[in-house]
Image: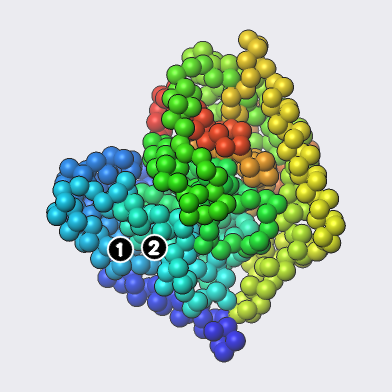
Amino acid sequence: MGSVQTWEQTVAQKRALRDRALELYITSDIGQRPPRIHNVHHRTCIHSDSTIQEITDIDSVPILLECLKRGQYTAEQVILAYIKRATIAHQLTNCLTEVVFEDALEQARRLDRLFREKGQLAGPLHGIPVTLKDQFNIKGVDTTLGYVGRSFAPATDDAVLVEMLKSMGAVIIGKTNLPQSIMWAETENPLWGLTVNPRNPLFTPGGSTGGEGALLALHGSVLGFGTDIGGSIRIPQSINGLYGFKPSSSRFPYYGVPVSTEGQEHVPSSIGPMTRDLSSLSYICRIFANAKPWTLDPKCVPLSWNEDTFQDTLSRPLVVGLILDDGVVKVHPPVERVLRELSAKLEAHGHEVVVWDASDHVAYIKLMDQYYTADGCEDIRRDVEVAGEPYIPHVEALINRGKAISVYEYWQLNKQKTALQKRYLDKWNAVRSPSGKPVDILLGPTMPHSAVPHRSVRWVGYTKIWNLLDYPAVTFPVDQVRADKDGLPDKLYRPRNELDEWNWGLYDPLTMDGHPINLQIIGKKLEEEKVLGAATVMEKIWGQQSTVAI
């Protein structure tokens, strides 16, 4: 349609269609729901209906599933409750793109009929509402990736992940916002506009799966799926104080999920779940691995869930490599405080902590940056040119520095990547704890900061290195910025480079006070069970599950 009308007209049509789909559920009291730091989900409360509150304040997917199994709620009740809160969340943050509420309600009614007839659930996600980053194909629905030019081109088939979700009884209620091109850690595009942080509209919710993060924080969803090629699942979940998992790229099915730079294999993008509690992450990973996704997607590794490894990780002292600094951008005071406090608690409970040397990370980051523009950003340019939409500033900067390289030069990058992957693996294998044991997992920052103002995110080195290595990584909430404890250090800090100076200049303990601080656990390739097991151990040790009121 971009060839017969202006991009602005396309935008107006797309937004009008979305708004009509939301119209029945719009609330008129948005002005009485001001920003708040703590218990941010209270902003979407529906006080007139206690059942809606009960349903949508259950953070755990397994617990909600048990309620459905007992007949405490019907699938239609659950889906309608989430539709209503998702709409309010959208009114507050602009997080939704494609809305499929009516299809969702019809599917829920079918599930209820099956339940009445057979007396059992239709699958391991029966009646569970799911939202998806606007990157997953749903048959008959657009997949825009934040590009105007991809409007009015509905998918002809479901993505494999969507197919599997539906077969498990899950009910998809909508898609969520992302940045133009996906290649950014914030959430803004000319088609759907800017998504804001649920706690402070002047702050970003992160990205690229930022619409999902905002929606989950406001209890407009209980389970989301995103993609992660540099931190796009982990960054928004970190900023919003939630749980996000980037598995190794071959554990979840990617077929039917369009992406910028589609066809490149050098930095694999991963699909992963985004939730409001840790048990839900483990549950989702378990049921998907055991559903044999490799029979539907040739890129999936034939690897079932290893419950023995998960349980072993829960039952013994661990050796933890502690990343305090990557040598490029120093973390803000609350991030360092939380890292040190958690590591001290781990040691007090009999686990061993070894300070991890991350000074070599910059070499991995530099290689990744060369990969991102290997095609001279032709893929992004082509998508933008379809409708003639403007570039958002970050994407414009990306394409302006992008210079295409030859196939031979590309091969040399791949050789460097393999050599770096081998170097990191050798380093990991060589490190021993004081008692002589190998390192099980790494613990470090997800981001060098908490939530920051829009268009302020510049360093994602703490997340994207694990994409190059294809290591699984989970982000989980631990604490929050505490202005009374997290002031600037007495000794003046002298930044070591321009990025470090920028990041340090962002720190304001007063405006950031109360915002979540997440940490990140990393494992070797395909050791998802160990990573999730370690997260379970650490959350228990911290002793304050969901300490951040989300």
Residue at the image position 45 percent from the left and 55 percent from the top = 161
Q: Amino acid at mark 1?
A: Ala
| Residue type, numbered disc 2 | Gly
Q: Position of residue 504 (x, y in %)?
A: 68, 41
- Name the quadrant of the N terminus: bottom right
C-alpha distance separating marks 1 and 2: 9 Å
Looking at marks 1 and 2 on the same chain, the residue that comes earlier in the sequence is marked by 1
305 sits left or right of 105 in the view: right
Give residue 345's mark. none
Check the picture and name the quadrant holding the C terminus: top left
Which residue does the numbered mark 2 point to in the structure image?
Answer: 174
Q: For mark 1, give the secondary structure.
A: helix
| Disc 1 to disc 2: CB gap under 8 Å | yes
Note whether residue 33 is visible.
Answer: no
Instruction: Answer with the quarter of the image where residue 442 lies.
Output: top right
Q: Position of residue 525 (x, y in %)?
A: 61, 37
Q: Does residue 436 appear in this view?
A: yes
Residue under pointer 1: 104
User: Where 300 sits versus 263, above or below?
Assistant: above
Looking at the picture, the colour scheme in use is: rainbow
Q: Which residue is pictured at 33% across the width and 69% down the height?
A: 22
